[in-house]
């Protein structure tokens, strides 16, 4: 067994040692020029190497020096490529950002080739979003894929925690950098984190004269490039901390760099590089700035923007991701300083939404000042562009004034009695969403009985007096936009169809997770304190039916890897509890 060599030598001395190892001769001026250290620093480092027994009196490296270099040099690499890359929308709608082609090369393939150039063949790629698209890399480059099942809900610290047993003199590499020169080396002597030499107010770290990396409370900091090397000098400590943080929910949304910080200073030194040689490709604008001829700029979403506004790609500015909704992915962008929103349908949406029916709905309501202003909508793809409403906010379901103005708007919409050629049948939709489940069995043990109970409410619903008109179906607090002098617009009409308009009241309640007192209050607001008992019980029944409907919808989304936490459980509870409430109310009549 080889003897483990441990020496306390600083970064400068290690850099001098590597230069001597790689070039074979001691020439202080050449070393100074190569390392950018002063001649005095180089001479001091050479003296330190001799004191530590790493450099012999004849200026040849000792066996201990060669052993130290062997022990600390790279053996593997981990590439982090699991994330959704939401900032890359719309480019990454149909491809993960790691597989985007930049200047004729796929980003991750270029990184893999650069690693292999220095002899790194043990390459592990942590994947998640569109993981299947990475499969070809196994055959082409003999890499190993590690799947992060929680990629949509946790940050890349969780990805790195999946490979703790593989970290052994390992490069950690983000997938979204185009490195003009190879950042990897055959030999390394210490752990480091790559920092750009320019400064910006986008980053919160500062590099000291001794190459320490410190957190900044405020001010201008150095650019964090994100490539790092972890070797035996800190490896055990790093892995212990990674294991601790990865199980702490406080760090579920943290970047992996959090592991490196001990209070406000990283446990590794900075490797300062020329920022212009390391190009982050993390947004549409970064891609078009670096390679306006990239194949991945030619996608349907971007083409729709170009066609709608008769502009070129480079005129699309300030793309910013809108928070991810339950059904879609959306982003802001500006054209000539005016802001718009583009909607891109989310995972599995094609099974849930009939976009031609949605198109019909927008055609029917576009002249009534009910919805947001549509610039363009494509019923084939589901892509939609709308004008952005400045200074708008969503309805606060706990604010009485918001409820009054939103229910007034909803009541006005219902009174228009708009007719379309399709309906939204609650019971058929429950069966339909159930048919999409992979397992065909619910995750809830009592589902068969609950479904039977809910379907038994149909008899009561059919006997109730009701009208049928265009109903929003998804009239939830988040879809009411309030702006100006209490103006209201109702957005997201994907599920809209012919139905009893009182279904919209039930939908608002269950999305807001209301209790019975709050539900009764909303009913009173909508009906202006003039709701008869039968109608109130009917709305209770809709709450039960719609609760099961959205519970089934959540189970389908769960099969796609999308979880909704408390929301999904509460919908199932509404199905059960409001069935009982309806039975009790009817029993008292």
Image: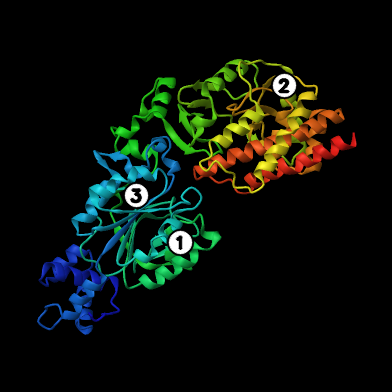
Q: Is residue 532 left or right of residue 320?
A: right
Residue at disc 3, secondary structure:
loop
Judge the density around disc 3: few (<14), some (14-19), many (≥20) Cα neighbours within 10 Å.
Answer: many
Which of the 4 image quadrants contains residue 78? bottom left
In space, the residues marked 2 and 1 are separated at their CA atoms by: 52 Å
Of the two numbered discs 3 and 1 in the rendering, the one whose residue sits closer to the viewer: 3
Pointer 3 or 1: first along the chain: 3
Pointer 2 or 3: first along the chain: 3
Residue at disc 1, secondary structure:
helix
In space, the residues marked 2 and 3 are separated at their CA atoms by: 50 Å
Instruction: Please give the residue where the numbered disc 1 appears in the rendered image.
Output: 258
Give the image location of residue 250, x and y in percent.
55, 60
Give the image location of residue 358, x and y in percent.
56, 22
**Residue 50 position (above or below residue 531):** below
Give the image location of residue 409, x and y in percent.
72, 25
Residue at disc 2, secondary structure:
helix
Q: Which mark is residue 414?
A: 2
Q: Is residue 273 left or right of residue 84?
A: left
**Residue 223 position (above or below residue 239):** above
**Residue 185 position (above or below residue 83):** below
Q: Is residue 154 left or right of residue 402?
A: left
Front one among 145 and 199: 145
In space, the residues marked 3 and 1 are separated at their CA atoms by: 18 Å
Quadrant in the picture for the N terminus: bottom left
Residue found 17% across the figure and 63% down from its top: 33
Residue found 47% across the figure and 60% down from its top: 216
Instruction: Please give the residue where the numbered disc 3 appears in the rendered image.
Output: 175
Residue found 58% across the figure and 19% down from its top: 362
Residue found 40% across the figure and 61% down from its top: 206
Judge the density around disc 2: few (<14), some (14-19), many (≥20) Cα neighbours within 10 Å.
Answer: many
Which of the 4 image quadrants contains residue 401? top right
Q: Is residue 472 left or right of residue 44?
A: right
């Amino acid at each position: 067994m080889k003897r483990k060599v441990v020496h306390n030598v600083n970064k400068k001395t290690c850099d001098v040692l590597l230069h001597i190892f790689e070039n074979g001769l001691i020439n202080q001026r050449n070393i100074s020029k190569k390392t950018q250290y002063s001649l005095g620093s180089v001479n001091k480092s050479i003296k330190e190497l001799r004191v530590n027994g790493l450099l012999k009196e004849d200026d040849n490296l000792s066996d201990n020096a060669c052993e130290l270099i062997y022990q600390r040099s790279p053996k593997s690499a981990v590439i982090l490529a699991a994330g959704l890359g939401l900032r890359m929308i719309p480019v990454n709608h149909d491809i993960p950002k790691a597989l985007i082609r930049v200047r004729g090369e796929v980003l991750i393939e270029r990184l893999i080739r650069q690693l292999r150039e220095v002899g790194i063949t043990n390459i592990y790629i942590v994947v998640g979003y569109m993981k299947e698209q990475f499969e070809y890399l196994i055959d082409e480059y003999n890499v190993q894929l590690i799947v992060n099942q929680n990629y949509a809900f946790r940050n890349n610290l969780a990805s790195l925690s999946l490979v703790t047993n593989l970290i052994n003199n390992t490069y950690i590499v983000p997938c979204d950098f185009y490195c003009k020169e190879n950042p990897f080396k055959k030999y390394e002597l210490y752990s480091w984190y790559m920092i750009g030499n320019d400064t910006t107010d986008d980053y919160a770290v500062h590099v000291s004269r001794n190459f320490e990396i410190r957190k900044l409370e405020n001010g201008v900091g150095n650019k964090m490039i994100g490539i790092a090397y972890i070797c035996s000098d800190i490896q055990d400590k790093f892995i212990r901390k990674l294991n601790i943080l990865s199980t702490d929910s406080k760090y579920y949304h943290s970047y992996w760099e959090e592991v490196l910080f001990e209070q406000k200073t990283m446990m590794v030194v900075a490797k300062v590089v020329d920022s212009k040689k390391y190009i982050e490709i993390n947004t549409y604008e970064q891609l078009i700035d670096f390679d306006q001829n990239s194949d991945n700029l030619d996608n349907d979403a971007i083409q729709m923007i170009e066609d709608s506004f008769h502009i070129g790609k480079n005129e699309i500015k300030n793309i910013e991701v809108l928070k991810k909704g339950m059904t879609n992915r959306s982003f802001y962008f500006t054209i000539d300083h005016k802001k718009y929103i583009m909607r891109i349908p989310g995972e599995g949406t094609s099974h849930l939404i009939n976009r031609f029916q949605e198109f019909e709905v927008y055609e029917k309501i576009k002249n009534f000042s009910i919805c947001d202003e549509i610039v363009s909508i494509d019923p084939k793809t589901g892509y939609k562009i709308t004008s952005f409403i400045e200074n708008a906010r969503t309805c606060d379901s706990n604010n009485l004034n918001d409820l009054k103005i939103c229910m007034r708007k909803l009541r006005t919409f219902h009174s228009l009695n708009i007719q379309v050629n399709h309906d939204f049948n609650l019971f058929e939709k429950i069966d339909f969403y159930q048919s999409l489940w992979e397992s065909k069995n619910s995750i809830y043990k009592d589902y068969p009985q609950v479904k039977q109970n809910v379907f038994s409410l149909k008899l009561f619903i059919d006997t109730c007096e009701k009208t049928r008109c265009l109903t929003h179906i998804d009239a939830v607090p988040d879809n009411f936009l309030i702006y100006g002098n209490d103006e209201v617009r109702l957005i997201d009409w994907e599920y809209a169809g012919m139905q009893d308009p009182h279904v919209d009241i039930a939908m608002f309640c269950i999305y807001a997770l209301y209790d019975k007192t709050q539900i009764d209050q909303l009913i009173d607001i909508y009906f202006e304190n003039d709701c008869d008992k039968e109608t109130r019980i009917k709305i209770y029944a809709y709450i039960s039916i719609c609760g099961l409907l959205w519970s089934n919808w959540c189970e389908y989304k769960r099969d796609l890897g999308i979880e909704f936490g408390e929301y999904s459980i509460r919908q199932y509870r509404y199905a059960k509890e409001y069935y009982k409430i309806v039975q009790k109310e009817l029993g008292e009549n």
